[in-house]
Amino acid sequence: MKISIIGQGYVGLTIAASAAEHFEVVGFDTNREIVAKLNSGISHIEGVQSSVLAKLIKSGTYRATTNGSDIQGSGIVVIAVPTPLSNDREPDLKYIDAACKTIGENTTTQVLVINESTSFPGTLRNFIKPAIDKYSSSQIEHLYAISPERVDPGRGDFNQKNTARLYSGMTPEASGKTKEFYSKFCDNLVEVSSPEVAEAAKLFENTFRQVNIALVNEFAQIAHALGISVYETLDAANTKPYGFMKFTPSAGVGGHCIPVDPTYLAAVAEAHGAPATFIRRANEVNLEMSEYIVRRVVEDNSGNLQSKNVLVVGVAYKPNVADVRETAAELVIEHLRSQGAVVSWHDEVVGSWRGESSAPLQGADIAIVVTKHDSVDEKKILASAPYVFDTTGKVKGAKGL
Ligand SMILES: NC(=O)c1ccc[n+]([C@@H]2O[C@H](COP(=O)([O-])OP(=O)(O)OC[C@H]3O[C@@H](n4cnc5c(N)ncnc54)[C@H](O)[C@@H]3O)[C@@H](O)[C@H]2O)c1
């Protein structure tokens, strides 16, 4: 069977690589540069190795394309496109709509459409299906299912194969076919009673993280005000074998999921007249962490950062990946610049970002560690400036939360 996957980013390419071990896979993406890279056997994400991709291309089971008509003849089409926030930080389904257009215009026989993009409950039933119907020139009744992705790029212990996967079809036939597809490369499939439950579960998982990270970030500020160590306190609480889960403070949350998904949940809640005050506040607390950190650094440096050379160490949103989407480093840099600091950044995993290149890890007046990659030497960080503020809790001997 031919499978098409719309969007060849972190999620889409991961699925494509697994599915291509069992099916003929076409990866459709609107980004020409990414498609050219993929077709020459170069992966652009951490979770899929170039050697694996090259092997799949050579065996003829995978190819990338920018041509929508190449999805014709597929039995299954998976949607894996971005679901960002709009400028006013509300859900923006424009990429999903574009994916539906590609599907509607290029399918002349019945397909199973599976959505893996994260969105609010009701997206499959009330947005994706009507959009595909609208863009189709024929009256075909497609099958529809949801299976939210849980991949954590760069993670070693849990991957697509051994992480439980939720799914639900809009009809029993869609559910059955979805199970058949994923069972080829996922060990543990969990069916839920409706697509809306699967969509809501995905949002709630990430909201759980957002809220707990906000809680520990607020607690870090309380611990500092009380003159006690936040890390020692968390370790002490973590000796309780039940009813507690340890989260650690940070400069904020980043990536495409944790800062975004809770807003999707809050928006759909409010649209249905249910308040989401707690979720909205958690988001604010995490966004405010960058300002708090810069305030602490200002206090430690005689209340003035004017013309100081400040090096931000680690701008990826989390360790050991090159992903800078929604990174907390962006707000930290913004607040530092508003204080008159001359800011550069060091991150060899990221390399270049916003038209700037990674600066050497040395010679600064102040260093602020936002993300600590395993490859970055702790001693070199400590030697990079006379004052080092660590937001990660990983650089022993530095000032910190
Ligand atoms: N990255 C993660 O860890 C992760 C985990 C779980 C769920 N998700 C969700 O999965 C979805 C995709 O996220 P991602 O991280 O893979 O995004 P990504 O930005 O890495 O990849 C998305 C790809 O889609 C392409 N694209 C955009 N519009 C398109 C269109 N109309 N047609 C075809 N391709 C198009 C982009 O060029 C890009 O290559 C999002 O809803 C996200 O919330 C992501």
Image (tube, grey):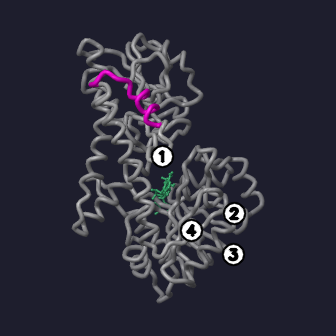
**Residue at image mark 4:** 190
Please tell me which of labels 2 and 1 falls first in the chain.
2
Q: Nearer the viewer, residue 144 or 232?
A: 232
Quadrant holding the N terminus: bottom right
Q: Nearer the viewer, residue 197 or 386?
A: 197
Q: Residue at x 48, y 46 (%)?
A: 242
Q: Nearer the viewer, residue 267 or 102?
A: 267
Q: Say if mark 2 contacts mark 1, CB within 8 Å.
A: no
**Residue at image mark 3:** 1
- Horizontal relation, residue 43 to residue 135: left or right: right
Check residue 226 for magenta coloring.
yes
The crowding category of the residue bearing disc 2, from other C-alpha atoms within 10 Å (few below 14, some 14 to 19, many at least 20), is: many
- Residue type at numbered disc 2: Ala
The answer to whether one can see residue 264 in this image is yes
Q: Residue at x 29, y 59 (%)?
A: 266
**Residue at image mark 2:** 20
Please tell me which of labels 3 and 2 falls first in the chain.
3
- Residue type at numbered disc 4: Val
Q: Residue at x 25, y 69 (%)?
A: 272
Q: Which residues are magenta?
A: 225-238
Please tell me which of labels 3 and 4 falls first in the chain.
3
Percent of width and height locating residue 167:
53, 70
Please tell me which of labels 2 and 4 falls first in the chain.
2
* Closer to the eye: label 3 or 4: 4
Secondary element at image label 1: loop
**Residue at image mark 1:** 242
Q: Residue at x 34, y 42 (%)?
A: 214
